[in-house]
Image (spheres, rainbow, N blue to C red):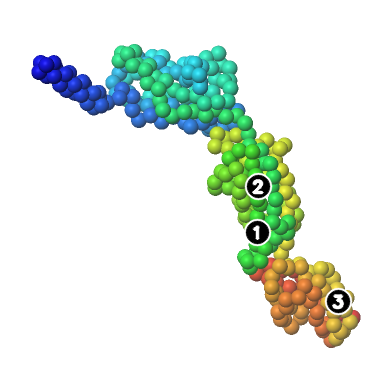
Amino acid sequence: MTATLVGLLIATAAAFAITERLKLTKSAVYGTVVSRGLSPTCGCARGRAKVFFQLRRPDDIAVSVLNARGQEVALLAAQSYPRGPVTLRWNGRDDGNQRVPDGTYRVQIHLSGQHQTIDLPNRIQLDTKPPQVLSVEENRQVFSPDGDHQADFVRMTYTLSKPAHVEFYLGRTRVLRSYRAPLRGSISWHGDTPNGKLEPGTYTLQVGAVDANGNSTPVAKRVPILVEIRYIRLANTRIVARAGRRFEIGVSTDAKRYGWKLGRRRGKASSPVLRLQAPTTPGRYTLTVTEHGHVSRAAVIVQ
């Protein structure tokens, strides 16, 4: 009985020692970096997946891409490599150069010299489906980005078909892109472009999106949004008034107060209808209204 017990203790100790030694054995492959996703149709840097790892010692290796069912779809490498870094690329195609279906794939490394097969833990998501803009609504169509905190921007609230960065284009120029990539969100535009702030006028923005794999909404499927940039503006560019009599003119602005000047007189007003007294001397004068650096002028003909 004692001999049996001693034998069991010795066997247990030996098994424990082997297990601990295995724990201390360094993996033959380390420092792995595998792209999370790719889109072979995006025409961008994410059109190929990167597979990087380091070998602890020289070996004959075979690196394969497997589908979700564990079937090999592509052989990336089958050759001898020295100790050190190995960098490979996968273009989303099988060994017959046919594009594989969208789905999840993994990388497997077989080391002949060590009779070992290692599955890299990182998965590659192959996705070629572009995001769609399901809805987009603006909080206002007319705004004046003049910094007076009155309708300085237009805010767009949107819903996408998949998480992606929403993008706004003016013609071929991208003028706005969201920092995050949610399924739903909102973003504000202050009339800025790469060349500076836009002049007053009506503009059509095209709304699209680009996902993490580089898939972009096709140009033909971008959603148009019509907006107008308007600063202070007089209703007419020419006014005829009688000498010394009062006249009025409409002023379009979102500012609470604006300045005006007519001849040598000047003042402040807040009404959308500016009422002034014409000069007593007949002639041609210039009426100027200003707000936060923006100006509108009209000729005043005094008879």
Q: Nearer the viewer, residue 203 or 76?
A: 76
Choose top left, top right, bottom left or bottom right for residue 64. Answer: top left
Which of discs 1 and 2 lies nearer the camera? The answer is 2
Corner quadrant of residue 237: bottom right
Question: Which disc number belongs to residue 225?
Answer: none
Q: Position of residue 167 (x, y in %)?
A: 62, 45
Quarter placement of the C terminus: bottom right
Residue name at image x 52 percent, y 29 percent: 125
- In terms of depth relative to the viewer, which is nearer, 141 or 268? 141
Q: CA distance from mark 3 to mark 2?
A: 50 Å
Residue drawn at x 41%, y 28% as measured from the top left: 121
- Image disc number at residue 158: 2
- The residue closer to the viewer here, 195 or 16, is 16
Query: Secondary structure under badge 1?
Result: loop
Q: Position of residue 235 (x, y in %)?
A: 81, 68
Closer to the chain start, of discs 3 and 2, is 2
Q: In x, y percent, where is residue 78?
A: 41, 14
**How packed is label 3: few (under 14 Cα within 10 Å), some, or many (20 or more)?**
some
Going by the numbered disc 3, the residue's amino acid type is: Ile
At 77% from the left edge and 71% from the top edge, which residue is drawn? Answer: 251
Query: Sequence-wise, which precedes: disc 3 or disc 1?
Result: 1
- Which type of secondary structure does the marked residue at label 3 adopt? strand
User: Which quarter of the rendered picture does the N terminus lie within?
Assistant: top left
Please tell me whether mark 2 sits on a helix, a strand or a loop: strand
Amino acid, disc 1: Phe
Q: Which residue position is annotated with label 1?
A: 153
Residue farthest along the front direction in this orientation = 1
Disc 1 to disc 2, C-alpha distance = 16 Å
Residue 190 lies, in percent from the top left, at 63, 57
Would you place residue 238 above or below residue 152 in this image?
A: below
Q: Check residue 301 in the rendering and tell me which mark sits there, or answer none.
A: 3
